[in-house]
Amino acid sequence: MEEITERLSYVKLAPQKSDAFLRAFEKVVAYASELRGDQLSDAEIDVTRRLAGPFTCGRLLILLIEPRQQHPWRQGIHTVILDCATLNALREGVHIGSNGALSLADDVSVLDLRPFVWAGLKDRLEEGQLVKLYDLVIEAISAKRPDTILRMGNVRHQSLVEGQ
């Protein structure tokens, strides 16, 4: 019995992959690409996709409001995180809070409520476009079924708690 108990300390439970979350997130990317047109770079999409991952069910999801206008997208996810005060503080908090077991870049999903749409661009979009983007993000969050949502910002989003 002691041998079995001892072996349990080496057991790791892998999170269940969620094709539904990935598909829902890709809808967000497709719609944002439609809204932004040629202004949406592959590097921005890649880093935003990495931040949204891992595409698994459950775990921690950090919900931000909107990205800042400029990030060093072409330099990759780690540079984007270190260059942004918010993401860097979250990186440090996740590292400390998990005792080094989790990484913001690899183990935690980070989504913006308005991905790919910074404040200045938001003001140029129609209300219906913003609502559709918001609905797609909520659909992605629902598909992820996170165990915990850490919401940054000061606006209450009732749709996140409806049906709970």
Image: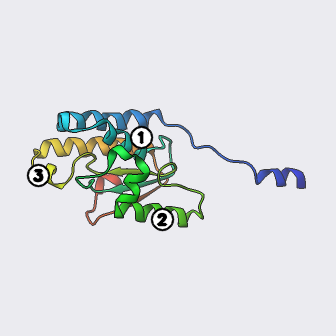
How far, Cα to Cα, is label 1 from label 2?
A: 27 Å
Q: Quadrant of residue 98?
A: bottom right
Give the residue pinned by disc 3. 123
- Residue 161 is labelled as none
Position of residue 92 in the picture relative to residue 118 (left or right)? right
User: Mark 3: which amino acid?
Assistant: Asp
**Which residue is at the far front?**
75
* Picture residue at 46% right of the left edge, 60% below the top: 91
Label 2: few (<14), some (14–19) or many (≥20) C-alpha neighbours in 10 Å: some
Q: Which secondary structure, mark 3? A: loop
Numbered disc in front, either 1 or 2: 2
Mark sitting earlier along the chain (1/2)? 2
Q: Earlier in the sequence, mark 2 or mark 3?
A: 2
**Amino acid type assigned to the residue bearing label 2 in the image:** Glu
Q: Which residue type does callout 1 highlight?
A: Ala
**Residue 85 higher or lower than 120, as above or below:** below
Nearer to the camera, 121 or 64 = 121
* Residues at marks 2 and 3 touching, judged by CB atoms closer than 8 Å: no
Q: Residue at x 89, y 55 (%)?
A: 2
Q: Which residue is found at the position 25% from the left and 52% from the top?
A: 70
- Whether label 3 touches label 1, CB < 8 Å: no
**Scheme of colours in the image:** rainbow
Number of marks in the image?
3
Name the residue that disc number 1 marks: 143
Residue 160 can be seen, yes or no: yes
Q: Which residue is mark 2?
A: 92
Q: Is residue 1 visible?
A: no
